[in-house]
């Protein structure tokens, strides 16, 4: 899906909006806004010292932009916007914490830590609170009286230098113990209160607008940095997990992967960095890659995560010419060991030879290093996955809605022309009659919507009760064990409890209940459609068009989101022999109670998500339908003016032109390929 197609859809939608009625304008404006802000985000995550910042510099072709020296960052998420919807291509915005956001950081971190607890988590909250207090103290010493005025604010810089960046995101020196701080030494001046940095660039070599995010490292001694990285996971569409070839897939890495899997995040690719530092070159790298893939399969099941390899150092040399630490023989040996990259290199050299200027040895060596770095492969992998995934689906859904309006406009203008030619136009009072009819239809839709929602809430309320009963019974059976022999009291230090059948049953329950809701919704929507069309046919001179039937595909093809069922249970199940001897019954009862509560929360999330999704789909169907009906009624007008025929012909020609332009965006067969269910 090219960027030109997105821009063309926006242009056509804006043109349609200028001539649409108010009802349709509201709907199309939402489409324009969604298309304009379609900007997938790519987050680089991983342990500290895995080389994320230098890797991002190579990935974005902004060599040396992000500092990559030892411990340069504080708690700052850095978003690099390429082709931002605002049109901005320079400067930066820096957003500052306020007290509420600091507290939320601590509270949300507790929730994430509880998903996969370990021996260290018991003291982490206390340490993070202490580190937040330390950040505030340092900021007060650095900023003085301006500290309290800056909280919750932001700074907007039209131009950005490396010195500016250092003031907001780099650690800098601690203020002296006596509270004296030299303002001339302003590296890190605002760093302790900076929550997020946003930096703007032109689109560069990316095929469509994207945001590339550098996150603080996980497994960081400064826990607040790790906390921010973990909490930012929900904000991105694609993740590049950076591993170091020296210590690939450590315990901390596996914990990060399990958390990402439990959160059902977007697409993931693994990049093993620093292969240039392996003594055995490509052979060692192949073994590391194989070990990583085996480890992911064992830890996550059939994870189906792609694993790429390369070197940010090689990319840095390719972009800057800095030969520090570069062994050209290693680069060429790497290419010889990877035939696909060798072919890219040789093809590229041929293109360079065909160019106008002379070919230099240094240019060829730097080109070889860039191919060997794996960054071109990583870029292609990420942009292709984003393009073929949700971005493509989003654009095609927008096309379908716009095409529905365009085809409806063609049919309406055609019917208007036919009415004029047959001299069967409506009477002069048709405008008020149309307004009254539309008002009645809106009232009908409003009443039906309220009834549908009430019926849905009754079904889902019953689902909550059944699910709670199911949870209580199933958890009791698992925790207490067959014949009362609880696995929690068995010998051994740690116990695995199998709640797979319970998760399957909860999935069946939510699927069954939402199927009932969906069928009842479709029945009521069919009734609305029939009543609305009957009201329209009663109007003098009304002629049916091909698009005046309600498109219920958004509801018809609803499937409940059951990702909450992948959430881990956070109860600590390790039981010491002493606790078993003292109070065996209380250990089992307490574990049962806590697990029931957690599964009940999962059940609540399932029901709440299903309700929100169903309601959104219902509103989409009805909003679209009302917009179409409003368009039909608007075109039902008198023909008393002498130029009515000319105007009607012009309207038809314009509508047909827009429809043809939309067809050209995806080709003549697009309507059959996009959402076949819409035809049902």
Image: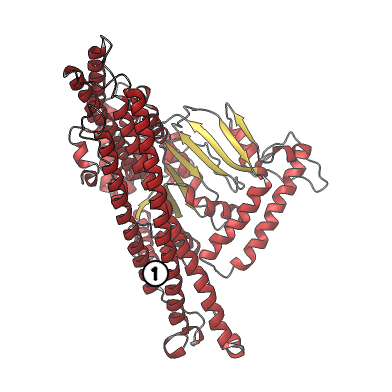
Q: Is 93 drawn above or below residue 264 in the view shown? A: above
Q: Is 157 drawn above or below residue 337 in the view shown? A: above
Q: Residue furthest top?
A: 642
Task: Report which quarter residue 207 is drawn in.
Answer: top left
Q: Position of residue 401 (x, y in %)?
A: 30, 36
**Residue sitting nearer the eye, 506 or 408:** 408
Whether residue 540 sits left or right of residue 571 in the image: it is left
Which residue position is annotated with label 1? Answer: 503
Task: Report which quarter residue 204 is drawn in.
Answer: top left
Q: Is 464 drawn above or below residue 412 in the view shown? A: below
**Residue sitting nearer the eye, 168 or 228:** 228
Whether residue 194 sits left or right of residue 316 in the image: it is right
Q: Position of residue 112 (x, y in %)?
A: 54, 60
Q: How is the image coloured?
A: secondary structure
Q: Tag 1, which secondary structure? A: helix
Task: Report which quarter residue 624 is drawn in.
Answer: top left
Residue 569 visible somewhere in the drawing: no
Residue at 47 percent across and 86 percent down: it is: 486
């Amino acid at each position: 899906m090219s960027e030109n197609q997105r821009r063309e859809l926006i242009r056509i939608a804006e043109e349609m909006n200028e001539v649409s009625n108010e009802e349709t304008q509201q709907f199309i404006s939402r489409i324009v806004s969604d298309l304009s802000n379609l900007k997938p985000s790519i987050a680089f995550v991983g342990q500290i010292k895995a080389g994320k910042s230098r890797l991002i510099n190579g990935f974005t072709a902004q060599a040396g932009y992000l500092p990559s020296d030892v411990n340069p960052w504080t708690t700052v998420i850095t978003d690099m916007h390429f082709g931002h919807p605002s049109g901005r291509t320079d400067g930066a915005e820096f957003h500052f914490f306020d007290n509420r956001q600091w507290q939320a950081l601590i509270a949300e971190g507790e929730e994430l830590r509880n998903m996969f607890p370990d021996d260290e988590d018991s003291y982490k909250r206390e340490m993070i609170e202490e580190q937040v207090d330390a950040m505030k103290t340092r900021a007060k010493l650095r900023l003085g009286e301006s500290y309290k005025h800056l909280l919750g604010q932001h700074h907007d810089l039209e131009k950005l230098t490396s010195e500016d960046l250092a003031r907001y995101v780099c650690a800098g020196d601690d203020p002296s113990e006596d509270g004296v701080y030299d303002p001339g030494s302003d590296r890190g001046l605002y760093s302790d209160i900076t929550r997020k940095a946003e930096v703007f660039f032109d689109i560069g070599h990316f095929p469509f607008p994207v945001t590339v995010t550098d996150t603080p490292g996980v497994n960081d001694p400064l826990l607040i940095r790790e906390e921010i990285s973990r909490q930012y996971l929900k904000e991105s569409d694609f993740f590049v997990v950076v591993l170091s070839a020296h210590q690939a897939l450590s315990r901390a890495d596996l914990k990060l992967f399990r958390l990402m899997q439990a959160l059902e995040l977007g697409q993931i690719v693994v990049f093993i960095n620093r292969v240039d530092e392996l003594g055995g070159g490509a052979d060692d790298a192949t073994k590391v890659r194989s070990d990583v893939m085996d480890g992911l399969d064992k830890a996550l099941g059939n994870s189906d995560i792609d694993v790429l390899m390369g070197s940010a150092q090689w990319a840095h040399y390719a972009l800057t010419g800095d030969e520090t630490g570069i062994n050209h023989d290693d680069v060429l040996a790497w290419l010889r060991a990877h035939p696909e990259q060798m072919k890219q290199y040789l093809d590229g050299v041929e293109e360079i030879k065909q160019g106008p200027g002379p070919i230099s040895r240094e240019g060829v060596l730097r080109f070889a290093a860039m191919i060997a770095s794996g960054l071109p492969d990583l870029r292609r992998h990420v942009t292709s996955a984003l393009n073929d995934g949700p971005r493509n689906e989003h654009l095609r859904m927008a096309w379908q809605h716009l095409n529905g309006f365009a085809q409806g406009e063609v049919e309406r203008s055609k019917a208007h022309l036919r009415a004029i030619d047959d001299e069967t136009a409506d009477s002069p009072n048709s405008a008020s009659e149309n307004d009254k009819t539309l008002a009645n239809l809106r009232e009908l839709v409003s009443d039906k919507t309220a009834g549908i929602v009430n019926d849905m809430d009754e079904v889902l309320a019953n689902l909550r009760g059944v699910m709670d009963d199911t949870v209580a019974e199933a958890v009791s059976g698992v925790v207490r064990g067959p014949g009362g022999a609880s696995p929690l009291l068995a010998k051994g230090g740690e116990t695995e409890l199998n709640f797979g059948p319970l998760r399957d049953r909860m999935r069946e329950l939510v699927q069954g209940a939402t199927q009932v809701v969906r069928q009842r919704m479709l029945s009521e929507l069919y009734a609305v459609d029939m009543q609305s069309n009957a009201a329209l046919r009663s109007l003098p001179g009304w002629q049916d068009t091909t698009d005046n039937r309600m498109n219920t595909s958004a509801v018809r093809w609803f499937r409940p989101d059951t990702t909450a069922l992948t959430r881990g249970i956070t109860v600590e199940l390790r039981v010491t022999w002493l606790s078993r001897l003292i109070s065996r019954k209380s250990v089992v009862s307490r574990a049962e109670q806590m697990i029931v509560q957690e599964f009940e929360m999962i059940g609540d999330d399932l029901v709440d998500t299903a309700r929100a999704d169903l309601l959104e789909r219902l509103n989409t169907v009805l909003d679209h339908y009302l917009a179409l009906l409003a368009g039909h009624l608007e075109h039902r007008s008198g023909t008393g003016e002498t130029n009515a025929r000319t105007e009607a012909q012009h309207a038809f020609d314009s509508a047909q032109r827009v429809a043809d332009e939309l067809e050209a965006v995806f080709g003549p067969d697009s309507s059959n390929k996009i959402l076949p269910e819409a035809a049902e």
